[in-house]
Amino acid sequence: MTTASAPGKIILFGEHAVVYGRPAIAVPVALIRVTVEVTDLPQGHAGVRIRSQMVAVDADLDELDLQHPLAFAVSQIFAAIEVDDAAVRIDIDSTIPMASGLGSGAAVTVALARALGEHFQRPISPERQSRIAFQVDRLHHGTPSGIDNTVIALEQPIYFVKGEDPLAFRVAVEVPLVIADSGHPSPTSESVGLVRERWLEDRPAYEDMFDAIAHVVDAARQHLEQGDIGALGPAMNANHRLLQRLGVSTPELDTLIASARAAGADGAKLSGGGLGGNIIALAADGDTAGLANVLRRAGAVNTIETRLRP
Ligand code: PMV
């Protein structure tokens, strides 16, 4: 049996503008993961059995529609490692909430690529894992920027510009964060579609907002690399104000953010596509548990405490 896993992710800065060629920063969240187990079938059995409670699948690969995300991912991976007569069972488990901007889709593909590559002794490089996950995301989300697959496959903080080589970088200080789920689904294709409509209506205004976001992202990267945690919270707040102007925040997200700030968080913003999904808040004093409590009392249905470490 072979086991492998891949982490979740959050976007720290730059969502949406990244679709329009501006930079964004995303980081892996190691505590939440997709785990994949690959087991050889007993003698005399052939084919590939896929089981995943998370998406209620227990089927032979052949039975699934080729457009099914798991079938598509597994077929792409088998093609990449040039395996065409496997006799295995694949079990997929996840602690990453689905459809909430935490990268569960890309993490499934990356964990599958790692587990199958290892099982068949044809390890797949992180860059290739990332490319396969991008193809799968593209099938289902239309025009992803590529940031999810990149940060999850490389498992490092990433400064990302679409079409350029991703830049992995180190943070110089511990950054204690709370991720809080509004409980409303976050349909990335909807929020990306909304921004596109508005951009088409008023390109100059939207290009200006994207430039302003890019400015915040570049400053934030410096703060992270120089360990200037005091400047990070205000940068998060500035990024959130711009996301509000883009039109992707909601009263629920704004309430969570206001509660975090009222409780002493140094900064807070929505993370990911918006219109629902998660916010992130910075607890520079390190008390993520206290901040998580406040956020749950303010209506968050789930919180995750995470720390970026130097
Ligand atoms: O909701 P998430 O975390 O999948 O993030 C979407 C991020 C966007 O910038 C809005 C879209 C993208 O493809 O980068």
Image (spheres, rainbow, N blue to C red):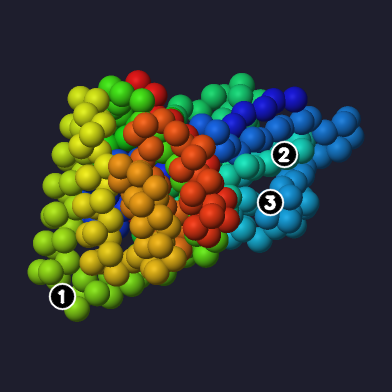
Instruction: Using the image, tell me which numbered label, if any, was put on residue 90.
Output: 2
Q: Amino acid at mark 3?
A: Met
Residue 98 in the image: above or below residue 307: below
What's the CA distance linking mark 2 and mark 1? 48 Å
* Residue corresponding to mark 3: 54
Between the C-alphas of marks 2 and 3, the distance is 13 Å
Pointer 1 residue: 202
Could you tell me the amino acid type at mark 2?
Ile
User: Callout 2: few (<14), some (14-19), or many (20+) C-alpha neighbours within 10 Å?
Assistant: many
Identify the residue shown where x is 36% and y is 25%. 174
Is label 2 or label 3 in front? 3
Residue 76 in the image: state x and y as whole percent: 55, 44
Quadrant housing the N terminus: top right
The answer to whether residue 106 is visible is no
Instruction: Measure the C-alpha gap from mark 3 to mark 1.
Output: 40 Å
CA neighbours of label 1 inside 10 A, class few (<14), some (14 to 19), many (20+): few
Asked if ligand 1 lies within 8 A of label 3, the reply is no
From this viewpoint, which residue is outermost toward the front?
263
Horizontal side of residue 23 vs 68, given as left or right: left
